[in-house]
Each structure stands twice: as C-alpha cells, then as structure tokens.
Image (cartoon, rainbow, N blue to C red):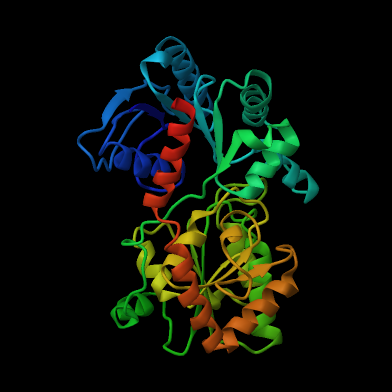
Amino acid sequence: MKIAITCGYYNKKGGISRYVAELAERFAKKNEVHVYSMGWEDVGNDELIFHKVHGIHNQYLLEWINFLASNTIRFKFKKNEFDVLHTNGFESLCHDVITSHSIHIAALKYLKTNNIPRGLGIADSVSLTIEKLIYSKYRNYKKIIADSTSSKEELMKYYDVPDEDIAVIPLGVDLDEYKPMDKSGLTGLRKKYDIDESDIVLLIVATEFYRKGMVELIHAINILINQRSLDHIKLIIVGRARDEGFRRGDTYYRELAGKLGVFKNVIFAGHINELNLHYNLADIFVFPTKYEAFGIPTLEAMACGLAVLNSKIGAGELMTDGVDGLHLNDPNNIREIADKLEMLIKDEKLRKLLGNNARKTAMKYSWDETARKTMNVYEQISG
C-alpha cells in the first residue's frame, strides 16, 4: 500500500508528531510511506520517504496556514497517486483519513462555560473556519479517526458528522519506554527534589496549567496539608505553563502555592526529558483536566503502574473507576479532588492494586495496537 501522511514537524516529543512517527515507522515495514512535513528528527526507519513542505518561520499562524494550503493544493492533484492520504488536524482540506486530535469549537465552549476570560483571537477564528470546512462543508474525507469517545461525540454534536464516519482509536504508549522500575535507583532524583522516603509523591504532567486543573489541584493540596495534616506529601509539576491571559507562565501558580502556604510541598520541575523516571518516582498521578481530547500522560502513567486520579474524559475513558484508577466526577470540585487523593494517600494497598491493574490496562493500548486498528481503517476505505 502506498501511504501519504502529514505532520507539521516529525519527531517523538509528544502529541501529534509522536502519533505520526509511531504509525509511520510501523507502516513502513510493509508499505511505501511518504511523510509530508516542515521538518523532521528522531527518524527511526530509513525506509520512510520525507517530503519537505517549506513553511514561514517564526510566524506560527502563517506557517500553519501555509502548510495547510500547500498540502491542499499538492494533494488535490496527487491524491490518486496514493492508496491512502492521512492528515492530522488542520493540515489539508484534501484527505482520505483525518485524525481529529481535538475539537476547537468544543474547547472554546468549555472556556466560555467556565467563565475563563479569553477573547476570540485571529487564530481561533481561523481554526473555527477551517474546522467547519473540514467537518461540515466539504467533507472530503472517507473516514475520521477520533482519539476518544468524547471527541467523537463532539464531532457529532457540533458538526453533525454521521456516527458511521468516525472510528474511535485511542493513542498508544511505548510499553518498553514507560514501565515500572526499581525505585531504589531513584535515590538521586529524590535527593534533587528534597523528597524524604516517607513522603507520598503526587505527579502531574502538563503545559496548559489552567485547563489541566492546576488551580484546583493546588487548592486541594492546601486542604490536605493545612486542614487534614497530611504534610508528608509532595506534588511534582512537570512541564512549563503557557501564558494564559493574566496568568503569565508558572508565576501565577508559584504565587498561589506561596499564598496558600504549600510552596515547599509543590515542586515546579519544568521541562524534563526523563519522564519515565519521574513517573516511577511518583506514588499517584493526578490529572483533573477540565477539557481533553485524549491526554497521553495519563496512559504513560498507567503503563508505569501508577495509581491514577483522572477526569472521566480523554484517556480517562480507558479506566474503570475503582479497578485501575479513580475517576473525578467534577474536576472543578476541589473537595472531591482532596477527598480522593486522601483516600489514595492513606491506603497503600489500594494504590498498589490500582497501579498493578493500570499497567495491565495500558498493555492493551500499545502503539502496535493503534497502528493495527489504523491500518484496518486504511484497508476498509481502499478495498
């Protein structure tokens, strides 16, 4: 099979780029795979055929529009050269398969519903226009792949996409990279963060701090420490906050932790490369996200055998409440977050049970499985 797949930048640093890289490398073993991208690194298969799509550097919006326009024109004339043309997000108006990694109109509705101050910017207006063209007006696709059931429901709700047009295929996880490890080898990391052997370590991996529930989480830490005397806990925040309105980077969240008197218990680790080590350093992964298409850190944490407290959406859909993790019914409810964290902090037996079952669940969602299901979609539309 001759396959063309698009990706703004090809690498294995996470998100859409990792998704494309994991699929492309697997497909290239038995197929001719062409990758159209503005740049690439971390290439793990010499049989991949790369095509440079020249962008407009240092101008994100213009670069993205140029990438979309270039691909649309190119594939309008070259579409018949391929058995399958697979695009991701807003990368072309011409495709056979499109993977919908997020629904922009749903994200904006979330912001409005939660009274989060943000005006409709140029990028939002362009995104909404293109999203409508792809899913509602032109519908040049043969199949849409959604990362989660919630994303599928949003496509059906906001753009009247027929149920039969959408295949739900969760993202995968590298089970060799993300796995339980002997915690005795983490002494240096515990020392780096000044974590005692008796401390219970909580972990969250995020960039859009507000949407991921960081405000509520820090307030929940305050309840646990200052109201319930659970002062032997440390929260590690991996990732750097983006500027969001009046919240400028990490500053707002550092000041909040200081104001609540829990700054010494909240560790802002920033961007790190040793994710597997940090998952294994933790006892509990907490992800009270308010809106999420998937959220791959949850699946990575499960693969590392962590007890997970997660919203019901995105990767949280893969969990069974009380079996391989705990669900948050309302990620805006600070007391619910505190109550369920307290349960996990006090019950080591429950943490281990949920963590062991989480690893078993994660093993069902390898990148091999994601690739197999995606290839099934290819074969259905090209057969």
Which x, y percent locates residue 287? Answer: 59, 63
Q: Residue furthest front?
A: 383
Which x, y percent locates residue 346? Answer: 59, 88
- Give 210 or 49, whichever is nearer the viewer: 49
Q: Is residue 170 left or right of residue 20?
A: right
The quadrant where residue 337 appears: bottom right
- Give 251 or 217, whichever is nearer the viewer: 217
Q: Is residue 59 left or right of residue 140?
A: left
Q: Is residue 148 visible?
A: yes
Q: Is residue 343 above or below residue 121?
A: below
The quadrant where residue 49 appears: top left
Q: Residue furthest left?
A: 46
* Residue in the picture at 73% in, 70% down: 334
Q: Is residue 310 left or right of residue 348?
A: right
Quadrant for the N terminus in the image: top left
Quadrant for the C terminus in the image: top left
* Residue in the picture at 26% in, 40% down: 43
* Residue in the picture at 60% in, 53% down: 314
Which x, y percent locates residue 226? Answer: 68, 84
